[in-house]
Image (cartoon, rainbow, N blue to C red):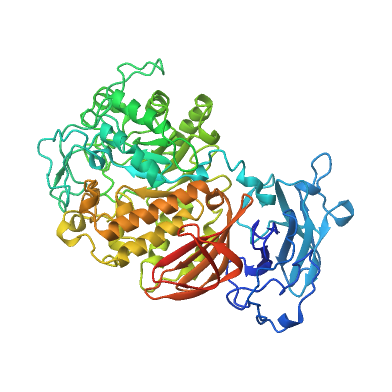
Amino acid sequence: MRLRVSWVFFCAAAVVACGGEGGFEIDASGTDAAMPPPYRPPRCGPGLSGGSGVQDAACADGGLPTVDAGFDAAPPPPPCNEVTFTYTDPAASTVWLSGTWLADAAGVWPATPAEGALELVREGDRWTLTTLVEPIGRHLYKFIVDGDRWVPDPSNPEREPDSFGGFNSVLDVCGASCGDPTAFDWRDTVMYFAMVDRFRDSDGRSDPVPGASDGDARIGASGQYEGGDLRGATERLPYLADLGVTAVWLSAPYENRDLAGAAIDPASDPHSYSAYHGYWPSPGDIDYAEPGDPVPTPAVESRIGTAADLHAFVDTAHATMGAGGHSLKVLFDYVMNHVDIESALYRNHPDWFARDSGRIRLCGPENLWDDPFWGTRCAFTDYLPPFDFDVPAARAWSVADALWWAKEFDIDGYRLDAIKHVPQSWLRDLRSRLRAEISDAPAGRFYLVGETFAYDDPGLIRSFVDPGTMLDGQFDFPFKARLCEAVFAPGGDLSRFADWLASNDGYYGAGAIMTTWIGNHDIPRAIHFASREIANCREGSSPANGWNSASFRQPTDAAPYERLALAFAVMMTNPGIPLIYYGDEIGLAGGGDPDNRRMMPWDDAALSPHQRALRQRVRALARLRGANPVLGRGRRVTVSADADTWVYRRVGCDDSVLVAINKADAPRSVTLPPGTYEDLLEGGEVRGVVSLPPRSYLVLR
């Protein structure tokens, strides 16, 4: 399958030519073996000006014509609603086009040319049509093959269900899906995860839990509270805003277990842990008969602060302007799977929690993680009994609790922990209540993002994503693994990653906003993947890497930090909400959990020049994303790609930004499309053939 695109506005297989220097062709996969690299100049190929099909003689053999040194001159751009549709089927006898803009007054799409369907013209194995689509806006369409077979565009990933159990393709004419570029949109967001206990200690005090395994969390692993608090996090909101962050995900602030607990598998991990991370909630026996006035009042974890401190954090964030001119948004972690066995809620309502013949079933030792029944009822450890959400009273209590925290503290979203271990009935109930009771959510949605730890099961991840009834998105684990393999691994291949990413676009459905990431709190620190100390991009935490800090020292050479900057460059210039795990902006070292949760260092003098340089690069990229909605809302058009380099455009929103990446450990040259470009990060102008230094990138307009 091939499609025709212009330099500037791109609508999947249907292409909107909204200004620019000309056109080129790519496969639906994003590659084109027949196209001479790295681009085809404007006067090559049909359809460049109204689809005339006229081709310059210099291009007759498919080669590149000579380009004058002054090749800035370009034909006048076609109107932005001029769209070229293509369909490849050598066996078809006719191919027609029908869609919402062709419908009659009753909304019925034409089924034949006599009724108004448009005919595509055959060119070898390919059928094409260039037409003006009016009115400008969002439209649905299908091809009609051989008069009776209605087919969504195979090369357009944007689609939505039709009324007959199939799909319609979605056409975005003139960037209509961008909406108001000046309004807040979750697609523009840069998210930062601050683990409160490890982020910033405002008073130098901590309240340790007896028996928890201690350590010096400034340089290594600790299972103990280290003193980070809500006031400290509030003090650092200006730092986050300056970094380009626009949403802060705060670790779970709820009252937690007060006793030390064993590891999931004590046989392999003899350490004891406190609940410093926030994932062992210990709620009281709270009565939500009056939803806005529960008795007793739900408690904030006293070791990190008070309810007043939590209100101050949210209020200060909402009063702080981030990149793009909008207030910082706040998400809480919400832990719905289980509670502390010592909690009053468990003691007073044991019938709300899953048991089998009186015993708690354990996920790990019994390997029940993916069991069709016990996967949503097994316990992570014996002191964290899991809810049985088939019990209506249990589900109602949990949803009411989540609603209270969201409304009481006026937050903007939730990160839902371990969502695959929770029945979808709970998630649907939560979304229904959120939609009914929170009417002023930013951009019309209280953002719900889930965690489903699955690097190679996108179908499982997708099964929880539906902005209308369940999640807005999930953390994109497949993206993380493949970005790591493409950018960090010596044999990584950016062209393969570009192809995969094209298939990932739209995979999770209309309206989904996934969260992209390269580091989080459950795996070794990203810098050790970037340094190639860890070769397996799916490696998780274990006692061997979580309590072996001496093996995970801060890298001293520049290369790991430059590779990590490349990963951030990809994330910041592509769809989804890019996540910065606290400390990854300086390449903070650390093995698996808990070594990956070292205290955030705030003394710049203690950072290496490479760490400070990485932070500056992340800052520039994040602020650029906030100022340029096309990076989050537009579409990607690959200009060229090979194992080491990738050049692509982000187009839409009346804008076009070009990104060029070299992940090799040596310089590589790329050829930019015709034109003179402004370097949006370093300033100055570039054009033509550009030599990219090792492990570098450009963002250009």
Is residue 471 among the parts visible in the rendering?
A: yes
Residue 276: % across, % down: 22, 38
> Which quarter shows the N terminus?
bottom right
Residue appearing at x 80%, y 74% in the figure? 54
Image position of 652 with respect to 284: above or below:
below
As displayed, is residue 296 above or below residue 574?
above
Q: What is the x, y in percent for residue 461?
A: 45, 50
Q: Examine the image and state in which quarter residue 423 appears.
A: top left
Residue 533, above or below 309: below
Q: Quadrant of residue 60?
A: bottom right
Q: Nearer the viewer, residue 163 or 127?
A: 127
For the C terminus, which image quadrant? bottom right
> Residue 231 lies in what quarter of the image?
top left
Q: Residue furthest left?
A: 211
Residue 499 % position (x, y): 53, 66
Does residue 374 appear in the picture of this structure? no
| Residue at figure coordinates x 58%, y 52% from the top left | 634
Question: Which residue corresponds to the image point at 31% horizontal and 67% vertical from the top-left?
Answer: 559
Front-most of 35 and 231?
Answer: 231
From this viewpoint, which residue is outermost toward the right? Answer: 114
Residue 577 or residue 279, whichever sits in front: 577
Q: Where is residue 287 shown, x and y percent of the image?
A: 34, 18
In the displayed structure, 263 sits above or below 305; it is below
Tell which residue pokes out farthest to the bottom in this image: 61
